[in-house]
Amino acid sequence: MEKILQVKDLELSFNTFGGEVKAIRGVNFDLYKGETLAIVGESGSGKSVTTKSIMRLLPESSAEFKSGEILFDGRDLTKLSDKEMQKIRGKDISMIFQDPMTSLNPTMPIGRQITEPLLKHQKISKSEARKVAIDLLRLVGMPKPELRMKQYPHQFSGGQRQRIVIAISLACNPQILIADEPTTALDVTIQAQILELMKDLQKKIDTSIIFITHDLGVVANVADRVAVMYGGKIVEIGTVDEIFYNPQHPYTWGLLSSMPSLDSEDAKLYAIPGTPPDLLEPPKGDAFALRSEYAMKIDMEMDPPFFEISDTHKAATWLLHPDAPQVEPPVSVIERMKKFPGSRYYEGSAN
Amino acid sequence: MARYIGKRIIYMVITLALIATFTFFLMKILPGSPIASADKLSPEQRAVVEARYGLDRPLPVQYFEYMFGLVQGDLGISINQFKGAEVTDVILSRMGPSAQIGFQGMLLGTAIGILLGMIAALRQNTWVDYSSTIVAIIGISIPSFVFASMLQYSLGLKLGWFPVALWKDGFMSSVLPSIALAMFPLATAARFIRTEMIEVLGSDYITLAKAKGASGSEIAFKHAFRNALIPLITVLGPMAVAILTGSLVVEQIFAIPGIGEQFVKSIMVSDFSIIMGTTIFFSVFLILVILIVDIMYGIIDPRIRLSGGKS
């Protein structure tokens, strides 16, 4: 498969009054053409910062690339000038934000907001752009698009606004669409509609999507591959089946155990103990060690490298080292692993 | 929209009636008499003069007569100035210069203030920002008559660019008083625009605009500016008041034959009818400014389209 974006050893820090916050500490991943890569992790794990750094949307006054590169179309995005970056934003890479209530300009008719990237990046007239905008609105399922072009954001519901934001992001047929928790601020029924819409549109325009979320239910629904982030690093990456049914990193175990499921019989939902690491002074060794009941002595001293479980599946945990003791994952995770061919708990296809 | 404005006009009339009533009785409580050399007149002479202006009748009668005249647009006649000219005529003849310096001052002040505020916000925490803040502090804390004197001395007397005072050279005469009046709106606009721009520039829709590929200037002018204007409109009312009260003093300093100057003179000689007339005139002006501000809200911010209207 064709790699459309490569993030290599990316390190990024914020310079604050309190000191240097190491928000991204060596992130590596590739994005393939036409796939959906979900990045999951708790707040502060660096998932949003990673994607915002791809778009270079972080405040230039405080955010600083320390090392690594972001390769897109043969160019390193971290080194482009502002002008060059402007030509890529909205055209090749576009973004959908979390809160549709605040991501549209309240004093500009939505028609103008949709045509803006078209007029900016494509050599078309205003009336042509208007036609494209109406088509886009129709594409995202907005009834009576001609009439609604002149309306302002406050005249739309939250779900409709997110549809408009999606229409804006798709205006120039981007190669990469970054969706930063696009359904978090919406209620559940609307969430489902927006997810369906995104899946549908991806098939139609063949774009690659980076989907940031902390909702594992959403991940299972939309993603082809999943990257789990913790403490500014990717700790496990694999296909959606590998992550859900054969997870290897204790943090992934924790995440999956804390997800309610229909057949979980315990009344109490699991919660990962402790708090996320302070990235002003990142811990030595595995950042998750202090919260993990599976931590070994080496976790406190050395950062684990990636161990390959399969061609597509990697996890950074010392538990995968040949010398590490066999540990039992949590019960709910074992239940999942029983369904995965190739895992040591596999019981054959149940259905 | 029409219904809304209609409703507003009714409220305006009520407000004006209250202001007129209040000012009328305040005037009557005040010590002093418009009949300047009252002491030298014999009681008979005095009675004649008072009868001439209707001052001999009981207070309620005077009040209702005044209000009745007001409804017909008659503000009475001047008591001890202009040989008994109509108050309306006096105000109208004096309005020109005041309106000119007021308007020029307001325009100059807000335009430069907005510019300063924008630059300060876009170059936050640089020397540009700090100097614009200093200008704003000076503009707000130093009263306009101090600026007036400073301008007279520097640009008028020392450099001789503009006439020091009097209203003889048309536009040139209006420059210094306009600048003096512009300082407060300038400072206010600069402060408001800076704060609001900084807030707006940090909002999500600006990030989205950036994610669309908009350049820095497109973001500032197409997306941020209009949203940053809303709070400035709120202070347009108070700014108009500042221009009005400022012009009372500034006109006096520059010896401009405007309403403000006339107002001050009339207070000195207790010319009740002119004071009343001017107060009502100022009130009408202010109430209109407030109405315009409310209508402008709706134009600039579609979320505040006025009730009763169908957009």
Image: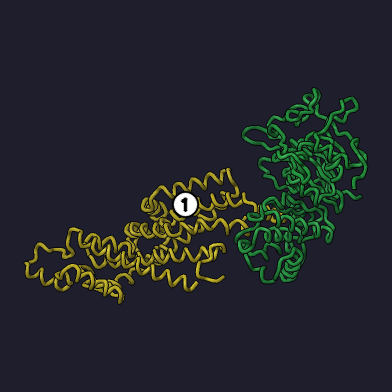
Chain colours: A green, B yellow
- Report x, y in % for residue A315: 85, 36
Q: Residue most toward the top?
A: A297
- Report x, y in % for residue A217: 77, 48
With A75 as the anchor, is B38 left or right in this view? left
Residue A194 picture quarter: bottom right
- Report x, y in % for residue A100: 66, 55
Q: Residue most toward the bottom?
A: B72
- Report x, y in % for residue B234: 47, 58
Camera-nearest residue between B131 and A177: A177
Q: Residue at x 48, y 74 (%)?
A: B2
Above or below residue A338? Residue A2 is below
Given the image, on which type of amino acid does mark 1 rest? Ala
Above or below residue A28? Residue B202 is below
Provide the residue designation for mark 1. B187
Q: Residue at x 41, y 55 (%)?
A: B180
Label 1 marks a residue whose chain is: B
Residue A302 picture quarter: top right
* One can see residue A65 in this view: no
